[in-house]
Amino acid sequence: MTPEGAGKLVEAFAQDAPGAYQLARLVSLAVSIERELLRKVRLALLPEVDAGAEADLWFSPLVETQSPLALVFVPEVADELRARLKRDQPLLKAVWELLAEFHRNAPPALCLEEELTWLALSDTDNVDLIERRLQSVMATMATGTRPGLARWAGRALPALPEKA
């Protein structure tokens, strides 16, 4: 899918299902979007949106894959949703705080990927912090003690926002 196609798809979805679109925009910060995360974000940040928005999003064309446990957005759709979320920095921060708490016990690579995404979308001057996080990944990869880390980096790093 092209970025232009993703933009059109997201815009059409926003027109057809505004509550589900709002929810999608907020949870786009996450790598893996669990049903419980959808519910937590909706109740905390979109109390006016009903539970049907969760189902509308779960089965929407924005989703690349879904399992009984979680969904993942089409990569270009995630980029578009994140660009839209970036425009509201206070909301971005509120989503980050919820997400960091929700995924506090998640695998470290997932937490790092979400943190890097948040840092890259944030308007604060945090390039040094992003570089330190990425240098830590490279240093760990160099030790050879975490062989799956290279596979994660090969998938995750190209998908991060441009600032990262």
Image (cartoon, grey):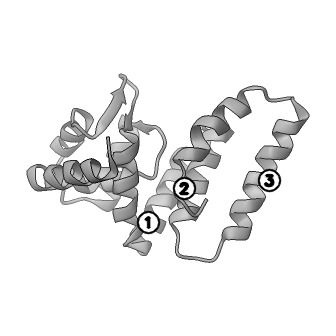
Q: Residue furthest right?
A: 143
Q: Residue furthest left?
A: 16
- What kind of element bears circle 3? helix
Disc 2/disc 3 C-alpha distance (Å): 16 Å
Q: Amino acid at mark 2?
A: Thr
The residue lying at 38 percent from left, 48 percent from top is 78
Residue 15 in view of the camera:
yes
Place residue 64 in its image quadrant: top left
Disc 1/disc 3 C-alpha distance (Å): 25 Å
Q: Residue furthest top?
A: 68
Say left or right for 66 vs 106.
left
| Towards the viewer: 129 or 47 | 129
The picture places residue 145, in percent across and down from the top left corner, at 86, 29
Residue 67 vs 71, above or below: the answer is above
The picture places residue 119, in percent across and down from the top left corner, at 58, 63
Q: The C terminus appears in which quarter of the rendering? A: bottom right
The residue lying at 67 percent from left, 30 percent from top is 151
Label whose residue precedes the other's in the sequence (1 or 2): 1
Q: The N terminus appears in which quarter of the rendering? A: top left
The picture places residue 138, in percent across and down from the top left corner, at 80, 45
Label whose residue precedes the other's in the sequence (2 or 3): 2
Disc 1/disc 2 C-alpha distance (Å): 11 Å
Q: Amino acid at mark 1?
A: Leu
Q: Neighbour class for label 3 at 10 Å: few (<14), some, many (≥20)?
A: few
Q: Which residue is mark 2?
A: 117
